[in-house]
Amino acid sequence: MVAVDGLELDVRPGECFGLLGPNGAGKTTTIEICEGLTPADSGEVELLGMRWDAHAGELRQRLGIQLQETQLSEKLTVMETVRLFRSFFRQGPETSEVIGLVHLEEKRNSRVGGLSGGQKQRLALACALVGNPDFLFLDEPTTGLDPQARRQLWELIEQFKLAGRTILLTTHYMDEAERLCDRVAIMDHGKVIALGTPRELIASIGVEHMVEFAAGTVAKALEVAALRRIEGVRDLRAENGNVQMQVTELHRAVPALLDELSRQGVPLTELRTHSASLEDVFVTLTGRHLRDE
Amino acid sequence: MSKEAVSATGLADHPLVQLTLMRFREFVREPEAIFWVFIFPILLAAGLGIAFRNRPPEVLGIAAVTPELAQSLRREKLLDVRQLSSDAAAEALRTGKVVLLAEPGPGGAVVYRYDDTNPEGRAAHMLADRAIQRAAGRVDPVASSERLMREPGSRYIDFLIPGLLGMNLMGSAIWGMGFAIVDARRKKLIKRLVATPMPRSYYLMSFGLSRLVLLWVEVAVVLGFGMLFFGVPLRGSLFDLSVLCVLGSMSFCALGLLIAARARTIEAASGLMNLVMMPMWIVSGVFFSAQRFPDVVQPAIKALPLTAAIDGLRAIMLQSANLVQLATQLAILGAWLIVCFTLAMRLFRWR
């Protein structure tokens, strides 16, 4: 089975690079090939000017890795866990310093088994940071966390960005990629289907805003063709009375839409607008939503 | 060992020390593991020791219907004599409360009433008659004396304790390795560890090291219990016993490592562990002598690591053998250690 095929990526020093895609897109396979944990059938990985076959020992000293779904030993305390991981690296910050970095001071003597999901994830991050890595790999760092825990983790990752570390992260949350990543590769079915800064990618679909509305039940059907003729409407999808429109100029398109709906005698039950996001990029490129499982 | 790691952060922060500490903490913080390794063998030894203990000679209850008879019979210490009326004595005999009834017969004779198909009745008859005859002045023509065989070393418990010790060495090593490794693999902890610069051999060595520490406690618990409560002897040297225990434990660790080398689930590993250990529990002479099996299979039984360990332990404890006399057993254990460890290193699944 081929999970990833013909991938060419170039992560620049000091940037945060995101692999964004739905589950099964090949993100984890890609990052684990980079981490030297999964051998690639073909191709080359070069990190910090080194290669896995020649410099594995040195590379391991300089990489910080967080795997998806690692369960650290539940019987150990936070302190003991970080100290264990610290012992593998030649150099790096003190155990207590790393625990401070991820804000787990209060939990330092708690068993890992008693931590919340967010705390466990921060501990996993601490274990990735003990060697003061030049390059940080984060595989789905916030999957399964509640919104508050996610925001906490984002703040931590932003601090490491400011410290000038290179980060490669995978995520299937488009808001996470937009917020954290300098550049994003959108993956689907083992291939990169778009690559660039979040801003570039959003601009590439040629729309700035999305307008969604739901129409109430009326005697005659909605005249979709008339909606398409509204100025600034680029694309339009209608299904089950829900209509999604890509528009360039929100301030012109919305009044025109309201006029047209009242002319047709269609009552609005819902109206939403948002700026175009990476989600819309993915939908535009694949016709599917990121979260469709 | 990496010099830099030692000089940078001190010996306590050497990866091997930290990994061993992890193993150690995981073990002592698991109450169930403590039970199976320390408490269970004691319960087993206590239960079997009591079940197969050498009982004191049984005292037989008999009845006598006259004070004179009762007085003569009470000189025999193995008889518990009750003086009862004729009716009460007959009733006691019928209901089995006494096994023999002595009553005066015609002309100064003594009549014994008992069930001659009951061994206790026959024994009571011989003892009672001897007591009556001696009380009446009989002198035995041949002088005799008795020497009782009850000294430590020849009882079942003396046979059992080395067997349990060997079984415990095997169980704690194989279970300890097997479950811990498969659990760490299932939780992706092994994968996470190999994503660090940790030398892989340290990970495997840490299991052996933590075993070497726990081993002393386990051996002391079982041995101490046997010696203290049952007076089981340790006739050979403690040093020889220690060497044998260490080598045995390391061989079983290597076997455990091999069993856990590829398994991904606890179920698969448990099955394999039982498959390996169960036959040895039966044929290696834990509870009864391995000699009971046919001669044809003896060489195969002798080649098993548990047989070698238990034979060695028994020889040291009961026959004060030394290590030179146990060269065969040590060689067998050493071979298992090397072969299993080499294979395990090749087969080990690191993810």
Image (cartoon, rainbow, N blue to C red):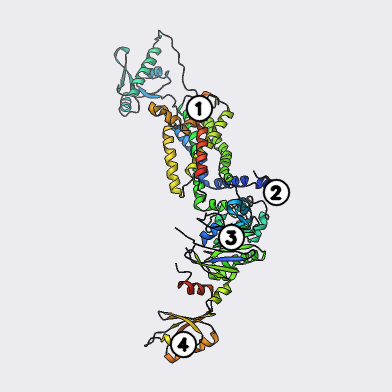
In the rendered image, which residue does mark 2 sit on? B8
Residue type at the position of mark 1: Thr
**Residue B38 in the image: x percent, y percent?**
52, 40
SS at badge 3: strand
| Nearer mark to the viewer, of 3 and 2 | 3
Label located before the other in sequence (3 or 4) = 3
- Can marks 1 and 2 be said to lie on one chain? yes
Q: Is label 4 or label 2 in front?
A: 4
> Residue A198, located in which quarter of the rendered image?
bottom right
Q: Label 2 amino acid?
A: Ala
For disc 2, the neighbor class at 10 Å (few under 14, some 14 to 19, many from 20) is few
Distance (Cα) linking label 3 and label 1: 53 Å
**Considering the image in quadrants, where does the C terminus of chain A appear?**
bottom left
The image position of residue A240, as x and y in percent, is 40, 79
The percent coordinates of residue A183 (x first, y second) are 59, 69
**Is the residue A27 above or below the residue A242 in the image?**
above
Disc 3 + disc 4, Cβ < 8 Å: no
Check disc 3 and report the residue beneath it. A137
Say the numbered circle drawn on residue A229.
4
Marks 1/2: CA–CA distance: 45 Å
Q: Residue at x 55, y 69 (%)?
A: A195
User: Mark 1 — residue?
Assistant: B328
